[in-house]
């Protein structure tokens, strides 16, 4: 059994960016990326809204705030260097009542604290100059937000990892780990790999992989499905760029919004409804193990007791196109249910603490021989190269 320097578990955009940064820093490393699917970026990477976030929403001083800003710059440079199509189209955040105006002002203060440049607080008339079909009391213009296809980014990262001597092994789910004094044996469905260091970037299964390595994670992954509709082609003119609501600060979700994709299509969504499987992209996908792990976790019932009404409303809206359209009409009144065609869905790996808190920052934990990325929801795709830098630095501190 050949000994590797590093095994990265997971070939989503964070795992690939980590392998890329490792080989960039130390080209002589033997790096293997193990992925349970047949290609890179199959789950969260391939099912997100394709937004290059600006750093607006995140608590100043948090990892999300710093790594989103740094990661967005690195991502744009990577796209330019590798001819990946992207567009910095800007985003407008729309306040439709007095409470939302106050929250919007707080968002602007956060953005300023995080270093987001060139924001503008808009009157209704100024907002309509940017997005003619919005309705609002005020809006915030964030010109540094952009769009890209993160699947293309992941594919290019995979190519770059291999070009630098890394190995990507697909269809190899990790089923076990055995920790020794100086090495770990990682067991996949097809073989065993001895390594000096394990990096867990398993996304929807990150907490399980951590437990395989003998580490007790301080959280449980709870899957939330986000469902999208697409605007019919004849109605795409209603959205020029990106239109967002003011988010509810109690939750790490941004609310249903409009996103113009890099291919010119316009998506509406996502909502955030509890999924019955960690890879539950449809309402009928059910995995008994996933349900049991969610329902038996103490933090879930604490969360459910506090926000059961919100959860029920999301579940009802999930099955009602008219209610989904009603939420969108807060932003663009001209939208009707007839304008919406069924779109795709994604599943967000959201970490939940045992006291019932939805963790609102990235969680990256390092201990001897292991680095675990335990919570990396949005804006992780935007931040991926910066997250990769952080993880690579932690990894190299063990290897030197």
Image (cartoon, rainbow, N blue to C red):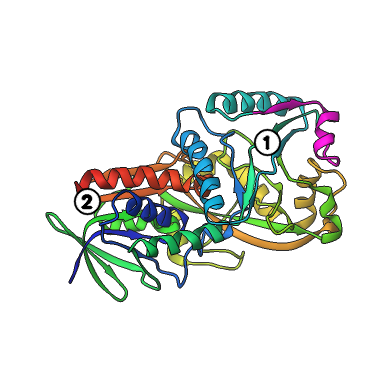
Q: Residue at x 62, y 55 (%)?
A: 85
Can residue 378 be seen by looking at this rendering?
no
Q: Position of residue 240 (x, y in %)?
A: 78, 46
Q: Which residue is mark 2?
A: 369
Label 2 crowding class (10 Å Cα cut-off): few <14, some 14-19, many 20+?
many
| Quadrant of the image occupied by residue 178 | bottom left
Task: Find out whether residue 129 is within the magenta segment.
Answer: yes
SS type, badge 1: loop
| Quadrant of the image occupied by residue 363 | top left
Q: Residue at x 44, y 70 (%)?
A: 37
| Left or right: 2 in relation to 113 | left
Magenta span of residues: 118-135
Q: Which residue is mark 1?
A: 143
From the viewer's side, name the closer residue of 392 and 280. 392
From the viewer's side, name the closer residue of 35 and 325. 35
Can residue 392 be seen by looking at this rendering?
yes
Q: Position of residue 68 (x, y in %)?
A: 51, 39
Q: Position of residue 312 (x, y in %)?
A: 64, 49
Q: Is residue 61 above or below residue 298?
A: above
The label nearer to you, 2 versus 1, is 1
- The total of numbered circles placed on residues is 2
């Amino acid at each position: 059994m050949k000994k590797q320097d590093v095994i990265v578990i997971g070939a989503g955009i964070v795992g690939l960016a980590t392998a890329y940064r490792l080989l960039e820093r130390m080209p002589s490393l033997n790096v293997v990326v193990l992925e349970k699917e047949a290609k890179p970026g199959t789950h969260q990477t391939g099912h997100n809204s394709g937004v290059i976030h600006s750093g607006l929403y995140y608590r100043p001083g948090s990892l999300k705030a710093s790594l989103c800003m740094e990661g967005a710059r690195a991502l744009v440079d990577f796209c330019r260097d590798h001819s990946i199509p992207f567009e910095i189209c800007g985003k407008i955040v729309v306040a439709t009542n007095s409470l939302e105006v106050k929250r919007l002002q707080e968002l602007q203060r956060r953005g300023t604290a995080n270093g987001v440049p060139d924001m503008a607080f808009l009157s209704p008339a100024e907002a309509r100059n940017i997005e003619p079909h919005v309705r609002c009391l005020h809006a915030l213009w964030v010109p540094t937000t952009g769009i890209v296809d993160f699947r293309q980014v992941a594919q290019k990262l995979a190519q770059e990892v291999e070009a630098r001597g890394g190995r990507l092994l697909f269809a190899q789910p990790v089923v076990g780990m055995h920790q020794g004094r100086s090495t770990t044996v990682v067991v996949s469905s097809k073989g065993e790999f001895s390594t000096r260091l394990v990096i867990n970037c398993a996304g929807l299964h990150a907490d399980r992989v951590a437990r395989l390595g003998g580490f007790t994670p301080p959280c449980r992954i709870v899957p939330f499905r986000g469902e999208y509709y697409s605007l019919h082609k004849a109605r795409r003119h209603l959205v020029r760029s990106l239109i967002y609501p003011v988010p509810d600060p109690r939750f790490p979700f941004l609310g249903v919004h409009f996103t113009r994709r890099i291919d010119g299509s316009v998506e509406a969504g996502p909502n955030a409804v509890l999924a019955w499987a960690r890879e539950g992209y449809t309402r009928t996908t059910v995995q008994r193990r996933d349900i049991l792990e969610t329902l038996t976790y103490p933090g879930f019932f604490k969360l459910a007791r506090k926000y059961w009404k919100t959860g029920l409303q999301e579940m009802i809206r999930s099955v009602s196109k008219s209610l989904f359209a009603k939420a969108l009409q807060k932003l663009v009144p001209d939208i009707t249910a007839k304008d919406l065609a069924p779109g795709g869905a994604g599943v967000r790996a959201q970490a939940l603490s045992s006291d019932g808190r939805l963790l609102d920052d990235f969680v990256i934990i390092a201990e001897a021989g292991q680095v675990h990325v335990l919570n990396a929801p949005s804006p992780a795709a935007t931040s991926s190269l910066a997250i990769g830098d952080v993880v690579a630095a932690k990894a190299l501190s063990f290897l030197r």
